[in-house]
Image: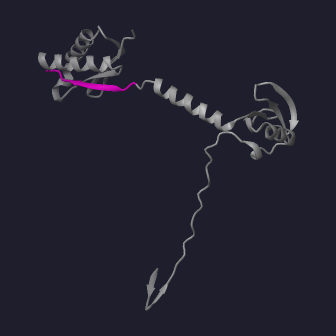
Amino acid sequence: MRRTGSVFRIIYFPILEVPHISKQEHLINEEITVPQVRLVGEEGEQLGIVSIDVAQNLSIEKGLDLVMIAPKAEPPVCRIMDYGKFRFEQEKREKEAKKKQQVVEVKEIQLSCSIGEHDFQTKLNHAFRFLKDGNKVKVCVRFKGREMRHTELGMDIVMRFAEAASECAQIDKKPVLEGRNLTLFLSPIKQ
């Protein structure tokens, strides 16, 4: 509302309608509008090409749903099935597949050209822990100032690190110098 003098004026703004996005992947029952379909029975048997009315009547007689499986086929393929049970089993399979998949992360370990022996061993132990968890390890040596003139020192440290971790890791990518960083990727050895 906007106040003009002593009178309030109401201003209406149009509400934008958001289109409804269906979560359904398949057309079912009355949503199917094609004139003819190739019909598959509930046991997977081919019932031939029939009109949509006949297909819908057959599904109603059996107390099941008519589901369009392949809409791009000529004519589209429809199947008589219990759609609720089908969706439940599909979601169950997706959850099982999600449980079994393993996400591989890349853990980064930073070294310097002047790293001490104890610090080197500590970083190596971290790398062992990451590799045992199934993650990849990115070993990075950052050159500061005049260290850029002695990149071979960084290469020696990286190769020493890879050699020390060779019992549970393999070199995934050779060491690469990108700007001021020398990087090496290690991946766990499959057992």
Foreground of the two, 87 or 27: 87
Q: Position of residue 28 (x, y in %)?
A: 72, 42
Query: In the visual, does 162 lie left or right of 68?
Result: left
Q: Report whether 156 appears left or right of 44.
A: left
Q: Residue 103 appears in which quarter of the rendering?
A: top left
Q: Residue at left 87%, top 35%?
A: 50
Residue 111 lies in the magenta-colored region? yes
**Viewed as shown, does residue 100 lie left or right of 132?**
right
Q: Which of 65 and 190 is in front in this view?
A: 65
What's the coloring here? one colour
Q: Quadrant of residue 136?
A: top left
Q: Is 15 inside the magenta-drawn segment?
A: no
Q: Which residue is drawn at 21% across and 26% down?
A: 143
Question: Residue at image x 57%, y 66%?
Answer: 15
Q: Give the range drawn in magenta.
A: 104-115
Q: Where is residue 113 in the image (x, y as percent from the top left)?
A: 17, 21
Count up the numbered dots. 0
Please tell me whether residue 31 is drawn above or below residue 5 in the rendered image: above
Write down the quadrant of residue 131 in the picture. top left
Q: Where in the figure is residue 173, as x and y percent of width and height?
A: 37, 17
Q: In which quadrant will I find the C terminus?
A: top left
* Residue furthest out toward the bottom: 6
Position of residue 22 in the picture relative to residue 154 (left or right): right
